[in-house]
Image (cartoon, helix red, strand yellow):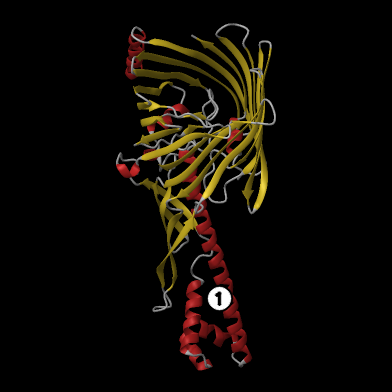
């Protein structure tokens, strides 16, 4: 509370020195997703302070907000991972009064170039759905006030012009996490790998049990055919050394011992305990930094941006998973998380049609190459000991499980029709949704959007269909966002919003968004 009071006092003092503007927004909504049906409300105020001098520009932007009885979209079990969750990501999920420093930066103008340093929000690309070519910043997918809000970066930006070419260089020493990706990715990857590990081991030992039982049955039949009684056969099986009297070799007798010992081991394996820790990948050093360099120019009525980005994913993934099973089949899993790096080539282009009036085209793409694409999984479990066949011994295996493709492309391309400032209609095709990065998890699909204004009534709508690869089949998911607002009163904008997503398969990329299905009343005042 003391910190919040200090922020408010500082803001009031700053208004005496800087020009300021902002908005106040109230939201009241009803969440009608399957997992929760209840109302929520929130209050948010943005205050922006600015000041310009001859060669200097300063901007400070703060969000103050409060959420009450909001739907907790993620039921997070933080028992083992609490230390991994950044505090700035925990706070928005609880109904307290909070503040967020959106931007605090200064621009220094130097001839044909500009140096920016501080905290700032990166510009989006030309696409409407999202910007696959903008990689350095994280996003907030749970924010009830803004759809897929771009989070700021801390760092330095230097841009300018060289003849007909523009350039832009950005360096950010720290990587911020996506919301809710910071939780979903490491936990889901770890859980899926652990479950698959236990399933495979269960299948293997079930097969071996069946083989051992069949081999013993065949041996009994062989001994019966040689004229031995059931009592004699049972005595030999209890003491396989006696099988030498029936003509079995030492190797065959060893296999009998091993088969009997195998049957003392369980057929079913499962992981009872999971612990998770992380490497210190967010330490502020050169290796953990992120940077991008791009160049822009005009070609045939198209603005073209081409660049290179070295950064880190906005979530952690397992680097190594050590799974150890006891002799009863129960296992413990110890996971070490890290933040993987990637190298990307980005492209963004937009332009107008030479053939049709009011038609424009746009497209963005990122060709992404992860620096490491696999998780090391070490598994320890018990098998019969060939040196002491009546006993078991722990054995270890190591496997590299791929979680990223060697390289992949995320892109959007679209066409847009605009009539004045009151009507816009567009359609886009995409490969990859904002939250998709993993192997066999890149959807494709299309979205259409409409913006129109009739008198003082404005309508904005977006509809999307995405096909996700699930069990080697592409299955559809749907999403729509609709907003109707009134602007007949200066600096006052009430609106109704609907957010809805649906997918039949729980593995679909849009399934998580279903938890945000809601209809809400929004009232916004500008000052």
- Considering the numbered disc 1 on the image, is that residue within a helix, a strand or a loop? helix
Is 215 drawn above or below residue 93 in the view shown?
A: below
Position in image of residue 92 (x %, y %): 45, 27
Q: Quadrant of residue 456?
A: top right
Position in image of residue 219 (x %, y %): 58, 84
Viewport quadrant of the N terminus: top left
Position in image of residue 94 (x %, y %): 46, 26
Name the foreground residue: 38 vs 329. Answer: 38
> Where is mark 1, residue-wise?
212
Position in image of residue 332 (x %, y %): 42, 55
Name the foreground residue: 467 vs 516. Answer: 467
Is 298 drawn above or below residue 281 in the view shown?
A: above
In the figure, is residue 371 to the left or right of 199?
Answer: left
- Binning the other alpha carbons within 10 Å of mark 1 as few (below 14), some (14 to 19) or many (20 upward) gives many
Q: In percent of the image, x 43 and y 39: which residue is there?
A: 78
Q: In percent of the image, x 47 and y 15: which residue is there?
A: 45
In the figure, is residue 158 to the left or right of 523?
Answer: left
Q: Residue furthest front?
A: 163
In the figure, is residue 481 to the left or right of 293?
Answer: right
Residue 178 visible, this orientation: no
Residue 42 visible, this orientation: yes
Q: In percent of the image, x 46 and y 32: which residue is there?
A: 164
Q: In percent of the image, x 44 and y 21: which residue is there?
A: 96
């Amino acid at each position: 509370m003391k910190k919040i009071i200090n922020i408010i006092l500082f803001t009031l003092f700053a208004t005496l020195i800087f020009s300021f503007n902002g908005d106040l927004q109230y939201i009241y909504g009803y969440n009608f997703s399957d997992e929760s049906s209840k109302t929520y409300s929130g209050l948010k105020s943005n205050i922006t302070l600015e000041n310009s001098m001859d060669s200097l520009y300063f901007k400070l932007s703060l969000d103050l907000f409060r959420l009450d009885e909001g739907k907790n979209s993620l039921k997070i079990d933080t028992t083992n991972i609490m230390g991994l969750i950044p505090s700035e990501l925990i706070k928005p999920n609880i109904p307290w009064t909070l503040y967020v420093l959106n931007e605090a930066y200064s621009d220094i103008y130097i001839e044909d170039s500009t140096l920016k340093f501080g905290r700032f929000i990166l510009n989006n690309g030309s696409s409407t759905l999202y910007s696959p070519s903008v990689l350095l910043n994280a996003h907030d997918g749970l924010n009830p006030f803004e759809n897929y809000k771009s989070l700021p970066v801390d760092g330095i930006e230097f841009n300018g012009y060289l003849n007909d070419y523009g350039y832009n260089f950005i360096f950010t020493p720290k990587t911020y996490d996506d919301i809710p990706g910071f939780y979903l990715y490491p936990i889901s990857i770890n859980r899926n790998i652990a479950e698959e590990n236990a399933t495979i081991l269960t299948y293997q030992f079930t097969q071996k049990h069946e083989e051992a039982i069949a081999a013993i049955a065949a041996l009994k039949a062989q001994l019966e055919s040689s004229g031995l009684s059931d009592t004699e056969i049972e005595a030999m099986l209890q003491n396989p050394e006696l099988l030498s009297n029936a003509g079995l070799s030492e190797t065959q007798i060893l296999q009998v011992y091993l088969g009997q010992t195998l049957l003392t081991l369980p057929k079913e394996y499962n992981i009872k305990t999971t612990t998770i820790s992380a490497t210190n990948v967010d330490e502020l050093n050169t290796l953990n930094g992120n940077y991008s360099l791009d160049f822009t120019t005009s070609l045939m009525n198209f603005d073209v941006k081409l660049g290179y980005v070295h950064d880190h994913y906005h979530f952690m993934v397992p680097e190594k998973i050590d799974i150890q099973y006891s002799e009863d089949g129960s296992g413990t899993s110890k996971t070490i998380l890290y933040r993987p790096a990637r190298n990307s080539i980005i492209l963004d282009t937009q332009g107008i049609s030479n053939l049709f009036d009011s038609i424009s085209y746009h497209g963005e793409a990122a060709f992404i190459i992860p620096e490491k694409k696999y998780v090391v999984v070490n598994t320890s479990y018990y098998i019969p000991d060939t040196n002491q066949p009546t006993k078991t011994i722990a054995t270890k295996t190591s496997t590299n499980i791929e979680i990223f493709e060697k390289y992949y492309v995320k892109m959007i391309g679209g066409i847009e029709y605009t009539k004045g400032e009151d009507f816009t209609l567009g359609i886009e095709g995409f490969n990859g949704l904002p939250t998709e990065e993993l192997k066999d998890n890149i959807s494709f699909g299309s979205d259409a959007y409409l913006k129109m204004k009739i008198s003082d009534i404005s309508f904005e709508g977006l509809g999307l269909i995405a096909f996700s690869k699930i069990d080697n089949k592409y299955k559809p998911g749907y999403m729509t966002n609709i907003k109707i607002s009134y602007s007949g009163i200066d600096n006052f904008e009430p609106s109704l919003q609907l957010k809805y997503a649906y997918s039949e398969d729980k593995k679909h990329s849009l399934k998580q968004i279903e938890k945000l299905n809601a209809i809400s009343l929004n009232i916004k005042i500008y000052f």
